Amino acid sequence: MRERKRRNTGRWRSLKNASTDRSESEEPMYATVVIARSSAGTSERAAIEEELGGLCVARGLDTVLVPDLYHVADRSHIWEVLAALPGPIVVFGRLYPRPLEWLLRSHGVGEDGLRAFDLGAYEDARSALRAALPGQPQEPGIAPGRLQELQEAVAPRWYPLVDRSRCTNCRHCLQFCIFGVYELDEAGHVTTKSPDNCKPGCPACARVCPNSAIMFPLHADDEAIAGAPGKFVTMDAAARRMYYLRTGARCPKCGLDAAAPPAAGRGGEKCAECGRRLPDSHATPAEAPRSEVLDEIDALINELDNLAHGSQ
Protein backbone atom coordinates (compact mmCIF):
# COMPACT_ATOMS: atom_id res chain seq x y z
CA MET A 1 0.00 0.00 0.00
CA ARG A 2 2.89 2.36 0.63
CA GLU A 3 3.99 1.94 -3.02
CA ARG A 4 0.50 2.96 -4.11
CA LYS A 5 0.72 6.15 -2.08
CA ARG A 6 3.92 7.12 -3.92
CA ARG A 7 2.34 6.44 -7.30
CA ASN A 8 -0.66 8.63 -6.50
CA THR A 9 1.19 11.42 -4.67
CA GLY A 10 0.03 14.06 -7.13
CA ARG A 11 -3.62 13.06 -6.79
CA TRP A 12 -3.99 12.89 -3.01
CA ARG A 13 -5.71 15.75 -1.24
CA SER A 14 -4.53 16.25 2.32
CA LEU A 15 -7.10 15.52 5.03
CA LYS A 16 -4.75 16.16 7.94
CA ASN A 17 -7.15 18.65 9.52
CA ALA A 18 -10.35 16.96 8.41
CA SER A 19 -12.86 15.74 10.97
CA THR A 20 -16.29 14.15 10.99
CA ASP A 21 -17.92 17.44 12.06
CA ARG A 22 -16.88 19.32 8.94
CA SER A 23 -18.98 19.76 5.82
CA GLU A 24 -18.40 17.50 2.84
CA SER A 25 -16.02 18.69 0.12
CA GLU A 26 -17.07 18.64 -3.50
CA GLU A 27 -13.52 17.90 -4.68
CA PRO A 28 -12.37 14.38 -5.57
CA MET A 29 -10.72 12.68 -2.63
CA TYR A 30 -8.17 9.89 -2.64
CA ALA A 31 -7.83 7.91 0.54
CA THR A 32 -7.42 4.46 2.00
CA VAL A 33 -10.85 3.07 2.86
CA VAL A 34 -11.57 0.97 5.95
CA ILE A 35 -14.87 -0.91 6.19
CA ALA A 36 -15.78 -2.36 9.59
CA ARG A 37 -18.10 -5.32 9.28
CA SER A 38 -21.23 -5.36 11.42
CA SER A 39 -21.09 -7.59 14.49
CA ALA A 40 -24.78 -8.37 13.89
CA GLY A 41 -23.71 -10.35 10.85
CA THR A 42 -27.00 -10.08 8.93
CA SER A 43 -26.98 -10.96 5.26
CA GLU A 44 -28.31 -7.51 4.32
CA ARG A 45 -25.52 -5.69 6.14
CA ALA A 46 -22.88 -8.08 4.80
CA ALA A 47 -24.11 -7.47 1.25
CA ILE A 48 -23.82 -3.69 1.66
CA GLU A 49 -20.30 -4.01 3.07
CA GLU A 50 -19.24 -6.29 0.20
CA GLU A 51 -20.74 -3.98 -2.41
CA LEU A 52 -19.12 -0.91 -0.85
CA GLY A 53 -15.74 -2.62 -0.87
CA GLY A 54 -16.14 -3.49 -4.51
CA LEU A 55 -17.13 0.06 -5.44
CA CYS A 56 -14.11 1.52 -3.66
CA VAL A 57 -11.68 -0.91 -5.28
CA ALA A 58 -13.19 -0.20 -8.71
CA ARG A 59 -12.41 3.49 -8.16
CA GLY A 60 -8.77 2.77 -7.51
CA LEU A 61 -8.96 3.01 -3.73
CA ASP A 62 -7.07 0.62 -1.48
CA THR A 63 -9.67 -0.93 0.81
CA VAL A 64 -9.38 -2.89 4.05
CA LEU A 65 -12.21 -4.98 5.52
CA VAL A 66 -12.03 -5.48 9.28
CA PRO A 67 -14.23 -6.92 12.06
CA ASP A 68 -16.48 -4.64 14.14
CA LEU A 69 -13.78 -2.29 15.47
CA TYR A 70 -15.52 -1.48 18.75
CA HIS A 71 -15.17 -5.12 19.78
CA VAL A 72 -11.59 -5.61 18.56
CA ALA A 73 -9.23 -6.15 21.51
CA ASP A 74 -6.89 -3.28 22.38
CA ARG A 75 -3.81 -5.45 21.81
CA SER A 76 -4.98 -6.86 18.48
CA HIS A 77 -2.56 -6.70 15.55
CA ILE A 78 -5.40 -5.12 13.56
CA TRP A 79 -4.75 -1.77 15.22
CA GLU A 80 -1.09 -1.90 14.21
CA VAL A 81 -2.03 -2.60 10.60
CA LEU A 82 -4.55 0.26 10.51
CA ALA A 83 -2.16 2.71 12.17
CA ALA A 84 0.40 1.94 9.44
CA LEU A 85 -1.98 2.69 6.55
CA PRO A 86 -0.71 5.48 4.29
CA GLY A 87 -2.35 8.83 3.72
CA PRO A 88 -5.78 9.99 4.88
CA ILE A 89 -8.31 7.36 5.89
CA VAL A 90 -12.06 7.10 5.33
CA VAL A 91 -13.72 4.60 7.65
CA PHE A 92 -17.22 3.12 7.45
CA GLY A 93 -18.83 1.37 10.41
CA ARG A 94 -22.05 0.85 12.30
CA LEU A 95 -21.44 3.50 14.97
CA TYR A 96 -22.15 7.21 14.94
CA PRO A 97 -19.28 9.07 13.23
CA ARG A 98 -17.95 10.77 16.38
CA PRO A 99 -17.35 7.63 18.50
CA LEU A 100 -16.07 5.78 15.43
CA GLU A 101 -13.55 8.54 14.77
CA TRP A 102 -12.29 8.71 18.36
CA LEU A 103 -12.11 4.94 18.61
CA LEU A 104 -9.60 4.94 15.74
CA ARG A 105 -7.75 8.00 17.00
CA SER A 106 -7.31 6.38 20.41
CA HIS A 107 -5.30 3.67 18.64
CA GLY A 108 -3.17 6.06 16.62
CA VAL A 109 -5.11 5.58 13.37
CA GLY A 110 -5.64 8.47 10.98
CA GLU A 111 -2.83 10.84 11.91
CA ASP A 112 -2.70 12.02 8.28
CA GLY A 113 -6.44 12.65 8.21
CA LEU A 114 -9.52 10.71 9.23
CA ARG A 115 -13.20 10.85 8.40
CA ALA A 116 -15.79 8.45 9.80
CA PHE A 117 -19.21 7.51 8.43
CA ASP A 118 -22.09 5.50 9.87
CA LEU A 119 -23.20 2.95 7.28
CA GLY A 120 -26.54 2.70 9.05
CA ALA A 121 -27.35 6.27 8.00
CA TYR A 122 -27.43 5.40 4.28
CA GLU A 123 -29.86 3.43 2.17
CA ASP A 124 -27.23 1.52 0.23
CA ALA A 125 -23.54 1.26 -0.56
CA ARG A 126 -23.61 3.78 -3.40
CA SER A 127 -25.20 6.53 -1.32
CA ALA A 128 -22.66 5.93 1.44
CA LEU A 129 -19.80 6.21 -1.07
CA ARG A 130 -21.21 9.42 -2.54
CA ALA A 131 -21.46 10.96 0.92
CA ALA A 132 -17.95 9.97 1.95
CA LEU A 133 -16.14 10.57 -1.34
CA PRO A 134 -18.11 13.21 -3.28
CA GLY A 135 -16.88 13.68 -6.81
CA GLN A 136 -14.75 10.54 -6.67
CA PRO A 137 -14.23 9.72 -10.36
CA GLN A 138 -14.60 6.31 -11.91
CA GLU A 139 -12.06 6.94 -14.61
CA PRO A 140 -11.96 4.61 -17.63
CA GLY A 141 -9.05 2.22 -17.37
CA ILE A 142 -8.13 3.23 -13.82
CA ALA A 143 -6.08 0.61 -12.01
CA PRO A 144 -8.23 -1.05 -9.33
CA GLY A 145 -7.34 -0.56 -5.71
CA ARG A 146 -6.09 -3.37 -3.52
CA LEU A 147 -8.51 -5.25 -1.31
CA GLN A 148 -7.36 -6.69 2.00
CA GLU A 149 -9.42 -8.41 4.68
CA LEU A 150 -8.24 -8.69 8.29
CA GLN A 151 -10.07 -11.48 10.07
CA GLU A 152 -10.15 -12.06 13.79
CA ALA A 153 -12.66 -13.49 16.24
CA VAL A 154 -14.05 -10.79 18.53
CA ALA A 155 -16.04 -10.91 21.76
CA PRO A 156 -18.70 -8.38 22.79
CA ARG A 157 -17.32 -5.41 24.72
CA TRP A 158 -18.77 -2.41 26.58
CA TYR A 159 -16.55 0.55 27.43
CA PRO A 160 -16.41 4.35 27.11
CA LEU A 161 -14.77 6.37 24.37
CA VAL A 162 -13.48 9.89 25.01
CA ASP A 163 -13.91 12.72 22.52
CA ARG A 164 -10.66 14.65 23.01
CA SER A 165 -12.05 17.67 21.19
CA ARG A 166 -14.59 18.08 24.01
CA CYS A 167 -12.64 16.79 27.01
CA THR A 168 -11.21 19.50 29.28
CA ASN A 169 -9.39 17.03 31.56
CA CYS A 170 -11.47 18.05 34.57
CA ARG A 171 -10.92 14.51 35.93
CA HIS A 172 -14.49 14.21 37.16
CA CYS A 173 -14.83 10.80 35.48
CA LEU A 174 -11.63 9.64 37.16
CA GLN A 175 -13.03 10.50 40.59
CA PHE A 176 -16.51 9.23 39.81
CA CYS A 177 -15.93 5.78 38.26
CA ILE A 178 -15.78 2.99 40.85
CA PHE A 179 -14.69 0.32 38.36
CA GLY A 180 -11.16 1.61 37.73
CA VAL A 181 -11.66 2.36 34.04
CA TYR A 182 -9.85 5.70 34.08
CA GLU A 183 -6.26 6.59 34.95
CA LEU A 184 -3.90 9.47 34.27
CA ASP A 185 -1.26 9.04 31.59
CA GLU A 186 2.31 10.36 31.84
CA ALA A 187 1.15 13.80 30.70
CA GLY A 188 -1.52 13.96 33.39
CA HIS A 189 -4.41 13.45 31.00
CA VAL A 190 -7.33 11.17 31.79
CA THR A 191 -7.28 8.00 29.72
CA THR A 192 -9.34 4.80 29.58
CA LYS A 193 -6.51 2.64 30.86
CA SER A 194 -8.68 -0.39 31.70
CA PRO A 195 -11.76 -0.12 29.48
CA ASP A 196 -12.88 -3.70 30.03
CA ASN A 197 -13.26 -3.00 33.75
CA CYS A 198 -16.43 -1.12 32.86
CA LYS A 199 -19.70 -2.63 34.02
CA PRO A 200 -21.65 -3.78 30.91
CA GLY A 201 -24.61 -1.51 30.39
CA CYS A 202 -23.40 1.21 32.79
CA PRO A 203 -23.20 4.70 31.20
CA ALA A 204 -23.02 6.62 34.50
CA CYS A 205 -19.79 8.51 33.79
CA ALA A 206 -21.25 9.82 30.53
CA ARG A 207 -24.19 11.26 32.45
CA VAL A 208 -21.94 13.32 34.73
CA CYS A 209 -19.43 14.58 32.15
CA PRO A 210 -19.98 18.35 31.89
CA ASN A 211 -18.90 18.49 28.24
CA SER A 212 -20.47 15.29 26.85
CA ALA A 213 -16.99 14.05 26.02
CA ILE A 214 -17.69 10.47 27.15
CA MET A 215 -19.54 8.19 24.76
CA PHE A 216 -20.94 4.68 24.96
CA PRO A 217 -21.67 3.96 21.29
CA LEU A 218 -23.87 0.92 21.98
CA HIS A 219 -26.16 2.79 24.39
CA ALA A 220 -29.64 2.50 22.89
CA ASP A 221 -31.68 4.78 25.16
CA ASP A 222 -29.90 8.12 24.73
CA GLU A 223 -28.47 9.37 21.42
CA ALA A 224 -26.25 11.88 23.20
CA ILE A 225 -24.57 9.16 25.26
CA ALA A 226 -24.18 7.06 22.10
CA GLY A 227 -22.34 9.98 20.45
CA ALA A 228 -24.92 11.16 17.92
CA PRO A 229 -23.83 14.21 15.89
CA GLY A 230 -24.56 17.51 17.60
CA LYS A 231 -26.04 15.90 20.71
CA PHE A 232 -25.07 16.79 24.28
CA VAL A 233 -25.99 15.01 27.50
CA THR A 234 -28.12 17.19 29.78
CA MET A 235 -26.79 16.89 33.31
CA ASP A 236 -29.49 16.99 35.96
CA ALA A 237 -29.20 19.24 39.01
CA ALA A 238 -27.68 16.52 41.22
CA ALA A 239 -25.01 15.68 38.63
CA ARG A 240 -24.08 19.34 38.22
CA ARG A 241 -23.74 19.88 41.95
CA MET A 242 -21.63 16.72 42.23
CA TYR A 243 -19.32 18.03 39.51
CA TYR A 244 -18.69 21.34 41.26
CA LEU A 245 -18.17 19.67 44.64
CA ARG A 246 -15.75 17.03 43.37
CA THR A 247 -13.71 19.17 40.99
CA GLY A 248 -13.80 22.44 42.95
CA ALA A 249 -14.63 24.26 39.72
CA ARG A 250 -15.91 27.82 39.88
CA CYS A 251 -19.67 28.10 39.52
CA PRO A 252 -20.71 30.39 36.65
CA LYS A 253 -23.80 31.54 38.56
CA CYS A 254 -22.60 32.34 42.08
CA GLY A 255 -18.89 32.67 41.34
CA LEU A 256 -17.85 30.43 44.25
CA ASP A 257 -15.20 27.73 43.93
CA ALA A 258 -13.37 25.29 46.19
CA ALA A 259 -11.13 28.09 47.50
CA ALA A 260 -14.08 30.06 48.86
CA PRO A 261 -14.56 29.71 52.64
CA PRO A 262 -17.65 27.64 53.50
CA ALA A 263 -20.66 29.78 54.33
CA ALA A 264 -22.14 28.99 57.72
CA GLY A 265 -25.67 28.85 58.92
CA ARG A 266 -28.91 27.03 58.26
CA GLY A 267 -30.53 30.18 57.03
CA GLY A 268 -28.09 30.78 54.17
CA GLU A 269 -29.43 30.11 50.69
CA LYS A 270 -27.80 27.61 48.37
CA CYS A 271 -26.78 28.25 44.80
CA ALA A 272 -29.24 26.44 42.55
CA GLU A 273 -26.44 25.52 40.14
CA CYS A 274 -23.55 24.27 42.28
CA GLY A 275 -25.29 23.63 45.63
CA ARG A 276 -22.73 25.65 47.59
CA ARG A 277 -24.14 27.56 50.52
CA LEU A 278 -24.15 31.28 49.91
CA PRO A 279 -22.75 33.59 52.63
CA ASP A 280 -25.07 34.24 55.57
CA SER A 281 -23.83 36.85 58.03
CA HIS A 282 -26.46 35.83 60.61
CA ALA A 283 -25.32 32.21 60.99
CA THR A 284 -22.53 30.58 62.96
CA PRO A 285 -20.17 27.77 61.92
CA ALA A 286 -21.59 25.45 64.55
CA GLU A 287 -24.95 25.52 62.83
CA ALA A 288 -23.68 24.33 59.44
CA PRO A 289 -25.61 21.20 58.41
CA ARG A 290 -24.38 18.26 56.39
CA SER A 291 -24.29 19.13 52.68
CA GLU A 292 -27.23 17.82 50.69
CA VAL A 293 -24.83 17.33 47.78
CA LEU A 294 -22.90 14.79 49.85
CA ASP A 295 -26.13 12.96 50.54
CA GLU A 296 -26.83 12.82 46.81
CA ILE A 297 -23.33 11.55 46.08
CA ASP A 298 -23.64 8.87 48.77
CA ALA A 299 -26.94 7.72 47.25
CA LEU A 300 -25.46 7.52 43.75
CA ILE A 301 -22.36 5.67 44.93
CA ASN A 302 -24.58 3.18 46.80
CA GLU A 303 -26.51 2.64 43.59
CA LEU A 304 -23.29 1.99 41.66
CA ASP A 305 -22.03 -0.34 44.42
CA ASN A 306 -25.26 -2.34 44.15
CA LEU A 307 -24.81 -2.47 40.37
CA ALA A 308 -21.24 -3.73 40.74
CA HIS A 309 -22.13 -6.39 43.32
CA GLY A 310 -25.08 -7.50 41.23
CA SER A 311 -22.70 -8.61 38.47
CA GLN A 312 -20.72 -10.90 40.76
Image (cartoon, rainbow, N blue to C red):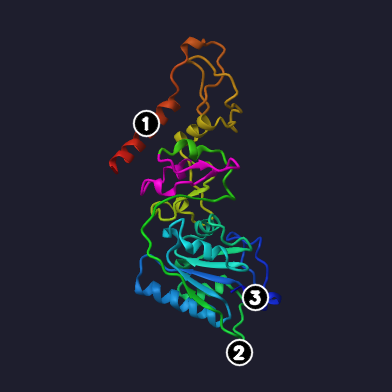
For discs 1 and 2, the disc positioned in front in the rendered view: 2
Cα separation between marks 2 and 3: 17 Å
Cα separation between marks 1 and 3: 55 Å
Residue 306 placement (x, y as % from top left)? 31, 37
Question: From the viewer's perspective, is residue 238 above or below residue 152?
Answer: above
Could you say which disc has been placed on residue 141 in the image?
2
Marks 2 and 3, the one that precedes in the sequence: 3
Residue drawn at x 44%, y 74% is 49
Q: Which residue is mark 3?
A: 28
Asked if the residue at tag 3 contacts the one at tag 2, i.e. Cβ–Cβ closer than 8 Å, the answer is: no
The answer to which image quadrant residue 110 occupies is: bottom right
Magenta stretch, main secondary structure class: loop
Q: Which residue is mark 1?
A: 299
Check the picture and name the quadrant holding the C terminus.
top left
Q: Which residues are magenta?
A: 179-208
Q: Nearer the viewer, residue 145 or 222?
A: 145
Local SS, label 2:
loop
Instruction: Tell me the kind of residue under disc 3.
Output: Pro
Residue 163 placement (x, y as % from top left)? 54, 51
